[in-house]
Amino acid sequence: MHVLVTGAAGFIGYHLTLRLLAAGHDVTGIDNLNDYYDVQLKKDRLASIASAPEAGKHFRFVRLDLADNAGLDALFTHENFTYVVNMAAQAGVRYSLQNPAAYISTNLTGFGHLLECCRNHNVAHLIFASSSSVYGLNTQRPYSVRHNTDHPASLYAATKKSNELMAHAYSHLYRLPCTGVRLFTVYGPWGRPDMAPHIFAAAIVRGQELRVFNKGRMCRDFTYIDDAVEALARLVPLIPTPDTDFDTAAPNPAASSAPWRVHNIGNNTSVELNTFISLLEDAFGQKARKTFLPMQPGDLEATFADINDMNERTGFTPKTHLRDGIARFAAWYREYYKS
């Protein structure tokens, strides 16, 4: 297979690229290397990919922004991609309150360009990252792909929901097979510095104030990176087909009469933030200096993934216990930051 991974210098894109290369596939990675967070971390991820034994002639990196329609089309014209996995996005719920234009450009305009390229160049399957944040104001848990997702609580969530709808339209109109994956709080080595595990680790190691929102009572379905990537890798060759049982009078939100599907990728467990912090303290052997603050706009009180559909489709079940995953993250953090 020749796979295009967008956002290859990102956290999940990096790990997925290594997983696909290890499986013997050719991978082209693209990324715009924006400065939303430390660019050096992204460059170090790319260097790590390039040094992998499987990389050799099987990996190529192109610096490219999805908003560059002409550049993207030229890449698709030059290459012959079997599958496309879109991990590129402007991430972050809170940042979407400060800089909404970045989300419009990458998550909507850029994704539209990608859909057009997949359609025009006969890509066999597009897998794209959605988010657990699409469940928004829904309080029915665990979150099922059969639940309503029409009430997002942030612009970031709204753009991810829009990606699902845009992909469905292309699947319906042009029969482009698409699978959306709603990722639940992925953590682990090489993680993003703007995410809670990284922020908490830095505060603990440096003895700095750790700002804990909603008094640490928020719950998250923390998903270890290896488990998330295993689920993604299994989905890549599983090209969706129209659901012959799809009922237009009572439509199932997770299926379609088009070749389109959506799945949750999570750990199927909801853990309170205070517990997560306690495990980080154990892993680093230091106590956090916590300051409790109120709930932030756009945040969800809890996430909890129902992964039954994913399990039935791929046989995937998460295997990494939270304590073990945090220990691996802490070991990487110490080594990378020499702390």
Image (tube, rainbow, N blue to C red):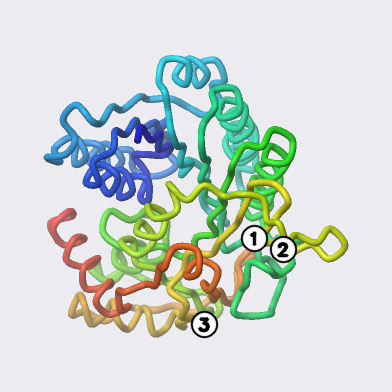
Mark 3: secondary structure: helix
- 191 in relation to 300, above or below: above
The residue beneath circle 3 is 215
Q: What secondary structure is marked by label 1?
A: helix
Q: Which residue is mark 2?
A: 149
Residue contact at pointers 2 and 1, CB within 8 angstroms? yes
Instruction: Residue at the far right: name it.
Output: 249
Q: How far, Cα to Cα, is label 2 from label 3?
A: 27 Å
Q: Residue at x 47, y 77 (%)?
A: 268
Q: Position of residue 99 (x, y in %)?
A: 60, 43
- Residue 146: in sight, yes or no? yes
Front disc: 2 or 3: 2
- Name the kind of residue labelled 3 in the image: Lys
Residue beneath disc 1:
134
Q: Using a 10 Å C-alpha cutoff, classify the residue at mark 3 as few (fewer than 14 neighbours), some (14 to 19) or many (20 or more).
A: some
In the picture, measured across the screen, residue 116 lies left or right of residue 48, that is: right
Q: Amino acid at mark 1?
A: Val
Residue 204 appears in which quarter of the rendering? bottom left
Q: Nearer the viewer, residue 113 or 339?
A: 113
Q: Is residue 97 visible?
A: no
Task: Name the side, left or right, on which 226 lies relative to 133.
Answer: left
Percent of width and height locating residue 81: 42, 28
Marks 1 and 3 close (CB-CB < 8 Å): no
